[in-house]
């Protein structure tokens, strides 16, 4: 059990763990867009249809989950930064133009998330995990 | 242009810009991690080479010790052989000396006999005369 956990850890690494977390967050957030109706009675312009945003989040989440064990994960980080910054900017746009006084908090949170992703994307994986991952890939083991 | 469309374009452009930035920093991180891993692998190779060198050095030291032991044993054997040879040589010298003495004695006996024979011959000739 411990060996499997260690192997899983070496397979995904620290960056993969972040992508796993973001993937779950995005997928669930997008899912909430698709299944739940808008809570607000005021008509809000999200620049794109509400369902489209839901699918964007779900796709970003699936991409993160798919890329978390990959050796090259730059596409997932780029996609994640794009989606989170876009959602933060949209929240800011709604706060500024559509009389939603509390939405600046959402904008700050999502833009901070985007910034965090920019920072994490620039962090290299630890050499130990990188080497072990290469060994696992060459062995072709699970 | 419709303000919503303009906002969409601005949001799209900014998100793309941030995405490109994330892509580039992620690429840089991948390169750095590959370089670091290569250095770690190099360090591993150095460690392995050092281990091999040290083990071969130890094997050589053991071999040298064994050779020294062999050489010591051979020196002892050589010393014993030299002792035996000198003993044999002294025995041979003694034997030669005793043979020479025997020869000298025999020669003396022969010369004594010769003189005895000559005396007897002389006595015989005198009696005959």
Image (spheres, rainbow, N blue to C red):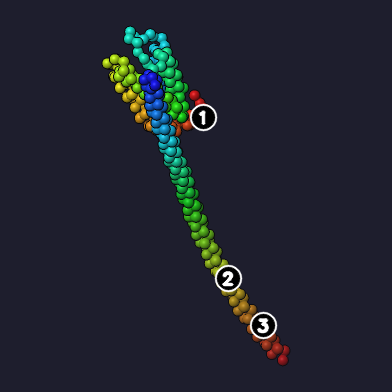
Residue at image mark 3: B117
Residue A86, position as x, y percentages in the image: 38, 22
Residue A114, position as x, y percentages in the image: 35, 25
Give how far apart the Cα atoms at labels 2 and 3 are: 31 Å
Residue B125 picture quarter: bottom right
Please give the chain letter of the residue carrying mark 3: B
Viewer-nearest of labels 2 and 3? Answer: 2
Q: Residue at x 50, y 29 (%)?
A: A137
Give how far apart the Cα atoms at labels 1 and 3 are: 115 Å
Residue B44, position as x, y percentages in the image: 44, 39
Q: Check disc 2 and report its element: helix, strand or loop.
A: helix
- Quarter that holds the N terminus of chain A: top left
> Label 1: how many residues lie within 10 Å, few (<14), some (14-19) or many (20+)?
few
Q: Can residue A111 be seen in this view?
A: yes
Q: Which residue reaches farthest left? A: A101
Question: Which residue is more in the foreground, A78 or B73?
Answer: A78
């Amino acid at each position: 059990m411990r060996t499997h956990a260690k192997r899983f850890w070496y397979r995904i690494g620290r960056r993969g763990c972040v992508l796993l977390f973001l993937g779950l967050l995005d997928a669930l957030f997008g899912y909430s867009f698709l299944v739940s109706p808008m809570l607000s009675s005021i008509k809000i312009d999200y620049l794109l249809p509400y369902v489209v945003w839901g699918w964007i989040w779900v796709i970003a989440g699936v991409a993160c989950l798919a890329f978390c064990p990959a050796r090259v994960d730059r596409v997932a980080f780029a996609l994640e930064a794009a989606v989170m910054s876009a959602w933060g900017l949209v929240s800011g746009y709604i706060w500024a133009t559509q009389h939603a006084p509390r939405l600046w908090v959402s904008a700050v949170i999502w833009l901070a998330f985007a910034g965090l992703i920019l920072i994490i994307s620039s962090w290299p994986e630890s050499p130990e995990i990188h080497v072990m991952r290469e060994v696992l890939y060459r062995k072709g083991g699970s | 242009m419709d303000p919503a469309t303009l906002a969409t374009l601005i949001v799209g452009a900014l998100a793309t810009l941030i995405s490109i930035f994330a892509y580039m920093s992620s690429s840089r991180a991948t390169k750095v991690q590959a370089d670091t891993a290569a250095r770690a692998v190099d360090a591993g190779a150095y460690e392995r080479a050092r281990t091999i060198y040290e083990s071969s050095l130890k094997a050589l030291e053991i071999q040298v010790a064994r050779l020294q032991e062999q050489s010591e044993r051979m020196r002892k054997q050589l010393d014993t052989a030299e002792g035996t040879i000198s003993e044999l040589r002294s025995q041979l010298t003694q034997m030669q000396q005793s043979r020479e003495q025997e020869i000298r004695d025999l020669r003396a006996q022969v010369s004594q006999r010769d003189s005895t024979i000559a005396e007897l011959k002389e006595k015989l000739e005198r009696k005959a005369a």
